[in-house]
Amino acid sequence: MILDIVSCVLLMFSAFLSIFAALGLLRFPDFLSRLHAGSKPQVLGLILAMIAIAIQAPTFGILTTLLLIVLFQMATTPVGTHMVGRAGYRTKHLRRSMLYQDQLAEAVAKADARDVTQRVPKSRDRRTEEAKGER
C-alpha cells in the first residue's frame, strides 16, 4: 500500500516534470534556454518514472533494464544537448544579447582561424603543382 503511494507520487512528479519541460520548450525565448528546458527536467522525469517502475516490479531483469535505460539517458542526453547547442551557436541560432558571458566565442574564433589557415596552403599547393605541370 505504501509502495503504491510512493510509486504514484513519483509518477506524478515525473509527469509534471515532462509537462514543464514541454512548456519550457514553448515558452522560453531563445534556443539555448529551450535546449536546457528540454533536457534537464526530461531526464529527471525519466529517472523518477524508472524508480516508480522499479518499486512496483523489483525483479532482477527489470531492475537491470531500468538501470541501463537510466545510465544510457544520463550518458547521452548531456552529450547530445551539448552538440546541438554548439551547432546552434555556430549557425547563429541564438540571441547573443541574452548571454551573460560568451565563453565559446574565443574557441570558435580559433577553430575558424585554424580552418582558414589549413585551407589556404592547400589551394596554393594546387596552383603551384598546376603551374609546374604546365611548364
Image (cartoon, rainbow, N blue to C red):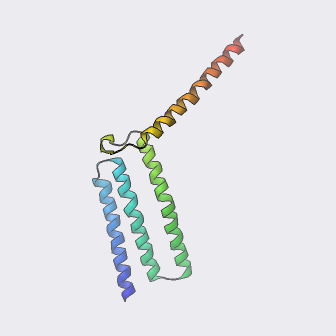
Q: Nearer the viewer, residue 82 or 103?
A: 103
Q: Residue at x 33, y 59 (%)?
A: 22
Q: Is residue 87 above or below residue 45?
A: above
Residue 101 picture location, percent across and down: 36, 44
Q: Is residue 72 left or right of residue 37?
A: right
Outermost residue toward the top in this view = 135
Q: Which quarter of the figure has residue 93?
A: top left
Q: Residue at x 54, y 32 (%)?
A: 115
Residue 76 picture location, percent across and down: 50, 59
Q: Quadrant of the C terminus?
A: top right
Q: Is residue 48 above or below residue 82?
A: below
Q: Is residue 115 above or below residue 47?
A: above
Residue 57 picture location, percent across and down: 48, 82
Q: Residue at x 31, y 68 (%)?
A: 16
Residue 127 picture location, percent across and down: 63, 18
Q: Is residue 118 left or right of residue 84?
A: right
